[in-house]
Image (cartoon, grey):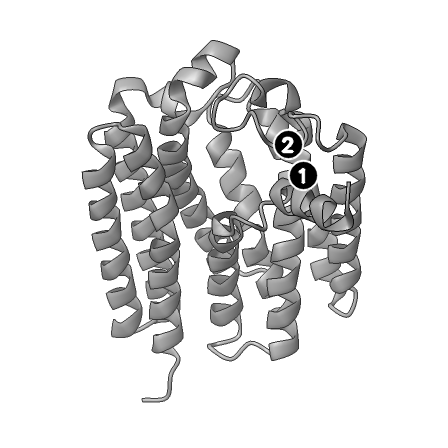
Amino acid sequence: MSLSERLALYAGLTRLNRPIGILLLLWPTLWGLWIAGSGHPPWHIAAIFILGTILMRSAGCAINDYADRDFDRHVKRTRERPVTSGKVAPREALWLASGLALAAFLLIQPLNGLTLLLSVPAALLAASYPFTKRFFAIPQAYLGIAFGFGIPMAFAAQLEAVPPIAWLLLLANVFWCIAYDTEYAMVDRDDDIRIGLRSSALLFGKHDLQAVMACYALALALLAAAGGMIGLGVAYYAGLLAAAGIAGYHYTLIRGRQREACFKAFLHNNWFGASVFAGIALNYLPS
């Protein structure tokens, strides 16, 4: 196998060819960076977090495919993934994940001790999430913590403390993650039942649509409360209003429970996160 072919397999393994996961991890991290930095986070810290997000998301995907290698072959959407198809050896995926995680850890070495300390649970959350699908009824909540842990780290990196608003933003991210990853789980509902994996789509059952919209509403309510806690202005709430409109659009996509439409709603969550960030960024622009 040529080097270019091997690199293409690694790109598929780490989902670099499908950046939606990176974006869904990046937006809450940027929320934390901008609020902690009052709209002006140091650019070297922002660069470290952005690159670290890409590295850790890529590592997490490699671990996920290692953990799910015996399940993915039974699902049409995932059966051609590099590990389960035999194109990349399981130990090779582990080595790649370890190398990416090590690179991310080395990247944050210039930051303060609290940030380094918080990187330990962040790494453990990312590494353990794939295995929660075997026993936890709502692994999407666990994923929301893992995807949102850049928020307290962003506050720690700039303030050397993690104030209550950071945990409020993290909780908002958990509910947002349950919403969008339930949309994703609705795509694989039949396959998950057949192979014995757990998901929020199975837990919510016939109430899945109501649960998704309730989670969007809770996420927005918590984000609104966070804005009120620190006195964010009209621009911020305009961003939340835009995000609410996007959530409403997602309902029109998922109400028929069609696989393609549910997956489209999942992908479109990039704009939900972007709308919240736009509101934050605009709030801090000079008036």
Whole-Å distance between the Cαs marked 2 and 1? 5 Å
Disc sitting over residue 20 in the figure = none
Which x, y percent locates residue 233? 29, 74
Q: Which residue is mark 1?
A: 62
Q: Which amino acid type is marked by label 1?
A: Ala
Q: Quadrant of residue 107?
A: bottom right
Q: Residue at x 27, y 28 (%)?
A: 258
Q: Residue at x 81, y 40 (%)?
A: 95
Instruction: Let me know if residue 63 appears in the view.
Output: yes
Looking at this view, is 282 or 88 the one in front?
Answer: 88
Q: Which amino acid type is marked by label 2?
A: Asp
User: From what the image shows, is residue 235 above or below residue 11?
Assistant: below
Which x, y percent locates residue 98? 78, 44
Q: Quadrant of residue 59?
A: top right
Which x, y percent locates residue 34? 49, 71
Q: Which residue is mark 2?
A: 65
User: From what the image shows, is residue 221 above or below residue 209?
Assistant: below
Element type at mark 2: helix
Q: Is residue 148 left or right of residue 212?
A: right
Q: Residue at x 54, y 16 (%)?
A: 74
Quadrant of the image containing the C terminus: bottom left
Looking at this view, is 85 or 159 the one in front?
Answer: 85
